Image: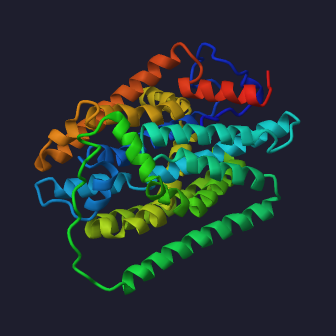
């Protein structure tokens, strides 16, 4: 998740004292993009975490925001984050795979070689994150996608392009079928959703939530299955763009095209999501948002090609990006501790009228904690704590010194 090394010889392993994030051997734009993706996914997940009924309540409330003074602010803020940063994070995983493949080739090693060990450890991280922290975990899905794409990257460029087109076509077909099902489904009033009783998010213990996730694991994992084809396409797109020189001066034409694509997709996504609301979230989140993510990717890449100096904000984002796996898990754990009943229980104590400013406040607080934690950790260590455990486990399993 944190591969940003251009020269494979610079990755010496171990938990050594951190070097400056802008060192020449790293593509700083990749670290910054990863940091943006991590804090951006929190911008989506925070609405789940602050909902008194967690993911269940969030899904039930889509498209049914209460008409308070904050209704339009909530729609705008949710739509700004919805799907774009998930798409960006998915693309960054594909870029990370391409970097690992390049490192293996330059080092004279077979590809994918021992990569399945990495995928297995990431899947284990995802299982633990799903059971103990967040039922909306993406790591298990990324592990499965990465394992498939790792083998696809060993094929020819033409074969990879065909797989990308095929995966994108399957995803488009799924969205089309969903659209037809919605259009031709009989219109019924339907009874209002019953509140959770008991509610493990607001009233349960930590263990109650663990049991709740396990009991409903099949339901909570539906999204990972649904987006598999999209994830394969975005992984392959990220790898292809990296090899095409997206982060070099020679990639100016590619960046320009992607920025134009993102500029066209962004107002469509925002307009549809804000005006129509949650009724079409499947199409904005999984249909239009990935194109916005590609535009954002190109925009940040262009910025750092033209302006090599990182700056204060860039350094903080790059630190989050370098500890992306740790920050992804930690931000959900911290926010859960603030909002759920096993922690401080803030979400259950907030009135509906204060839900939006409360959510904004929690997002800013958790972001500050995450950024500060990443900064302090990297002053002493080269890798984040979860990254270090993951790397150490891989070296042990793969019998690498």
The vertical placement of 1 against 277, above or below, is above
The vertical placement of 13 against 243, above or below, is above
Q: Position of residue 169 (x, y in %)?
A: 61, 72
Image side of residue 327 versus residue 205, left or right? right
Image side of residue 127 versus residue 74, left or right? right
The structure residue drawn at horizontal position 28% and vertical position 30%, both measured from the top left corner, is 343
Q: Residue furthest right?
A: 108
Q: Nearer the viewer, residue 300 or 354?
A: 354
Q: Nearer the viewer, residue 136 or 364?
A: 136
The structure residue drawn at horizontal position 70% and vertical position 53%, both measured from the top left corner, is 149
Q: Nearer the viewer, residue 155 or 66?
A: 66
The vertical placement of 94 against 331, above or below, is below
Image side of residue 194 versus residue 165, left or right? left
Q: Position of residue 392 (x, y in %)?
A: 67, 24
The structure residue drawn at horizontal position 85% and vertical position 33%, both measured from the top left corner, is 107
Q: Position of residue 76 (x, y in %)?
A: 27, 56
Q: Nearer the viewer, residue 30 or 377?
A: 377
Image side of residue 217 versus residue 69, left or right? right
Q: Is residue 23 visible?
A: yes
- Quadrant for the N terminus in the image: top right
Q: Position of residue 27 (x, y in %)?
A: 62, 34
Which quadrant of the structure image shows residue 267?
bottom left
Colour setup of the view: rainbow
- Quadrant for the C terminus in the image: top right
């Amino acid at each position: 998740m944190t591969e940003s090394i251009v020269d494979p010889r610079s990755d010496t392993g171990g938990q050594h004292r951190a070097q400056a994030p802008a060192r020449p051997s790293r593509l700083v734009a990749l670290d910054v993009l990863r940091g943006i993706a991590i804090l951006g996914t929190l911008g989506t997940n925070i609405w789940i975490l602050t909902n008194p009924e967690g993911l269940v309540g969030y899904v039930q409330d889509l498209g049914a925001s209460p008409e308070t003074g904050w209704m339009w602010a909530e729609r705008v803020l949710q739509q700004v984050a919805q799907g774009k940063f998930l798409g960006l994070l998915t693309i960054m995983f594909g870029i990370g795979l391409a970097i690992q493949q390049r490192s293996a080739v330059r080092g004279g090693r077979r590809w994918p070689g021992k990569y399945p060990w990495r995928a297995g450890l990431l899947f284990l991280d995802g299982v633990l994150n799903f059971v103990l922290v967040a039922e909306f975990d993406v790591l298990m899905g990324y592990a499965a996608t990465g394992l498939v794409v790792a083998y696809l990257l060993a094929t020819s460029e033409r074969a990879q392009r065909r797989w990308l087109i095929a995966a994108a076509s399957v995803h488009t077909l799924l969205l089309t079928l969903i659209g037809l099902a919605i259009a031709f489904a009989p219109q019924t009033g339907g009874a209002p959703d019953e509140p959770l009783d008991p509610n493990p998010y607001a009233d349960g213990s930590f263990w109650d939530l663990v049991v709740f996730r396990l009991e409903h694991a099949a339901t909570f994992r539906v999204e990972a299955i649904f987006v598999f084809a999209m994830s394969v396409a975005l992984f392959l797109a990220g790898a292809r763009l990296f090899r095409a020189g997206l982060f070099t001066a020679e990639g100016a034409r590619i960046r320009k095209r992607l920025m134009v694509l993102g500029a066209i997709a962004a107002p469509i996504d925002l307009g549809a999501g804000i005006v129509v609301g949650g009724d079409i979230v499947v199409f904005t989140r999984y249909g239009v948002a990935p194109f916005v993510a590609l535009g954002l990717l190109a925009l940040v890449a262009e910025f750092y090609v033209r302006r090599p100096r990182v700056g204060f904000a860039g350094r903080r984002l790059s630190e989050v990006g370098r500890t992306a796996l740790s920050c992804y898990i930690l931000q959900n754990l911290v926010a859960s501790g603030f909002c759920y009943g096993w922690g401080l229980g803030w979400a259950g104590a907030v009135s509906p009228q204060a839900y939006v400013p409360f959510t904004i406040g929690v997002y800013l607080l958790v972001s500050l904690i995450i950024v500060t934690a990443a900064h302090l950790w990297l002053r002493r260590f080269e890798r984040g704590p979860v990254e270090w455990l993951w790397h150490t486990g891989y070296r042990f399993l793969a019998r690498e010194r």
